[in-house]
Image (tube, rainbow, N blue to C red):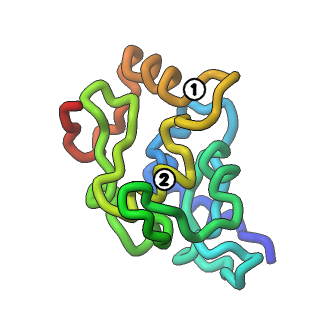
Amino acid sequence: MTINEITRQYVRNRANYLCEYCHSPEKISTSRFTIDHIQPRSLGGADDANNLALACSRCNQRRYNFIVGRDLETSSTLPLFNPRQQLWSEHFIWTTNATKILGVTAVGRATCDRLDLNDERYRGERSIQEARNLWVAAGWHPPVDDPQQTEI
């Protein structure tokens, strides 16, 4: 089934035009963000708004059809962060320089690892941390509705 334009716009507005996983702002992206199925269609997920999240292409590609991740601190396998059921600010914080997302809960850490929210494993192209650094310098990041940052 195809997601209609009204639902797409609802999801985009609800997310305040931020990726619901890494909180990158869509306005500085070269392409429109995608509508992600929190419970993937391939695993029985529906097209209703409660199963949809706005995702940058980077997070969407890394999330793929995964619904769990591993918390490297506890070695537990846990469900990934669900923006329809959980608050971003309860699971993640920004470093002081706003270039890195830290998972402060097991779910947050598992999501950071699975979605590689800080480019810990990928090299060769511009890292998301380098991009965030430019966004901070331009005054576009972090989003104003993000939680307080912490010192690292």
| Residue indicated by mark 1 | 127
Q: Is residue 14 visible in this depiction of the protein?
A: no
Which disc is residue 31 wearing? none
Q: Is residue 59 above or below residue 141?
A: below
Q: SS of the residue at dot 1? A: loop
Amino acid under disc 2: Tyr
Q: Residue at x 59, y 59 (%)?
A: 9
x and y percent of residue 70 in the render? 50, 62
Amino acid under disc 1: Ser
Q: Residue at x 50, y 43 (%)?
A: 117
In front: 107, or 83? 107
The label nearer to you, 2 versus 1, is 1
| Residue indicated by mark 2 | 21
**Disc 2/disc 1 C-alpha distance (Å):** 16 Å
Q: Is residue 13 above or below residue 132?
A: below
Q: Is residue 137 above or below residue 7?
A: above
Q: Report the side of 122 relative to 90 (left or right).
A: right
x and y percent of residue 22 in the render? 47, 46
Q: Is residue 106 visible in this depiction of the protein?
A: yes
Q: Residue at x 76, y 76 (%)?
A: 42
**Quadrant hosting residue 28:** top right
The N terminus appears in which quarter of the rendering? Answer: bottom right
Instruction: Mark 2: give few (<14), some (14-19) or many (20+) Cα within 10 Å.
Output: many
Q: Residue at x 29, y 45 (%)?
A: 93
Spot the residue most to the bottom. 44
Q: Is residue 13 above or below residue 32?
A: below
x and y percent of residue 92 in the render? 33, 51
Comes first in the chain, label 2 or label 1? 2
Q: SS of the residue at dot 2? A: loop
The C terminus appears in which quarter of the rendering? Answer: top left
Instruction: Mark 1: give few (<14), some (14-19) or many (20+) Cα within 10 Å.
Output: some
